Image (tube, rainbow, N blue to C red):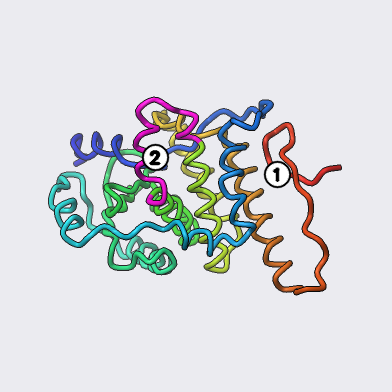
């Protein structure tokens, strides 16, 4: 039986149960969430892995993790099926990349919609609905986004108190972390794009869109993901070609607020 207590708790978790619903492409300025999120990654110079290593916080201690897990409600927790266990097992690669193997507890839950959330920096909550929707690489993408929240935990908590634009920016930063993670695992950004689209559309059909204001439009979110992926690919090409490589492609922030080459 679905637990109202567990369902209520998910509203206090950093979650990805919906990704925004508006599809418009409005003019942007340098202070909007997309532009600021792109600017955040500018110091990386396309070397996302090194950038994340510099920012990565220490993991939660074993004693704190144990206290967090002990405080979780048991109602609504589900025993994973064999298929779910197989998907969950693929997350080890994500945890290893983020130096979190053994530090993250995974719980499968029933909350009545597609939900993936990081609770107290140490518990990854996966709803059965979400697990049924995504393929293993897509689940890795969603988990990488959630682990991205660790980099900005205190800032995000403060923003939730009354700065929706900052919340949207941080959600985009977490997408950037996910793209960097996927690249390290040998994937492009496509699993993340597919995953957020699936969860968004599924929850829209259920009218489970309470967190929609936390995200920019799905269209802009996809464009941001692709822009970060292009930066990482450009950096990789420069590194591979060595000192004889061409000069880096000049980029600018256009009217949409997204990275593009001047024409």
Q: Let me know if residue 226 is in the magenta part.
A: no
51 sits to left or right of 247: left
Q: Position of residue 17 (x, y in %)?
A: 40, 40
Tell me what residue is drawn at x 57 percent, y 63 percent: 183
- Earlier-in-chain disc, 2 versus 1: 2
In the image: residue 213, left or right of residue 58: right
Q: Is residue 106 left or right of residue 245?
A: left
Residue 129 % position (x, y):
37, 46
Taking the spot 47% from the left edge, 41% from the top edge, the residue there is: 170
Circle 1 is placed at which residue position?
259
Does the magenta-highlighted stretch encompass residue 154? yes
Give the residue at mark 2.
Answer: 155
The span shown in magenta is: 150-168
* Residue 39 on image: x %, y %: 60, 43
Name the residue at 47% across, 33% down: 166
> Which corner quadrant holds the N terminus?
top left
In depth, the one of 253 and 16 nearer the eye is 253
Q: Secondary structure at mark 1?
A: strand
Location of residue 10 with respect to 229 vertically, above or below? above
**Closest to the observer: 62 or 16?**
62
Give the alpha-carbon distance from disc 2 to disc 1, as whole Å.
25 Å
């Amino acid at each position: 039986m679905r637990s109202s207590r567990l369902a209520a708790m998910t509203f206090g978790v950093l979650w990805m149960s919906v990704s925004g619903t508006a599809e418009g492409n409005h003019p942007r300025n340098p202070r909007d969430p997309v532009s600021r999120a792109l600017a955040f990654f500018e110091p990386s110079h396309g070397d996302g892995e090194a950038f994340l290593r510099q920012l990565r916080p220490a993991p939660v201690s074993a004693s704190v993790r144990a206290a967090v897990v002990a405080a979780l409600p048991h109602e609504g927790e589900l025993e994973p099926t064999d298929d779910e266990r197989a998907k969950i097992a693929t997350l080890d690669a994500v945890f290893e990349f983020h130096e979190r193997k053994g530090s993250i507890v995974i719980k499968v839950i029933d909350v009545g919609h597609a939900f993936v959330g990081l609770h107290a920096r140490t518990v990854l909550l996966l709803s059965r609905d979400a697990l049924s929707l995504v393929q293993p690489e897509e689940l890795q993408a969603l988990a990488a986004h959630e682990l991205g929240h660790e980099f900005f935990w205190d800032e995000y908590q403060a923003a939730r108190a009354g700065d929706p634009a900052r919340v949207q920016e941080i959600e985009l930063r977490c997408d950037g972390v996910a793209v960097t993670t996927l690249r390290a695992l040998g994937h492009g950004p496509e699993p993340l794009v597919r995953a957020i689209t699936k969860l968004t559309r599924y929850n829209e059909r259920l009218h489970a869109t309470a967190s929609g204001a936390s995200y920019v439009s799905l269209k802009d979110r996809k464009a941001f993901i692709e822009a970060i992926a292009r930066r990482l690919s450009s950096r990789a090409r420069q590194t591979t070609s060595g000192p004889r490589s061409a000069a880096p492609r000049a980029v600018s922030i256009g009217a949409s607020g997204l990275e593009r080459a001047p024409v």
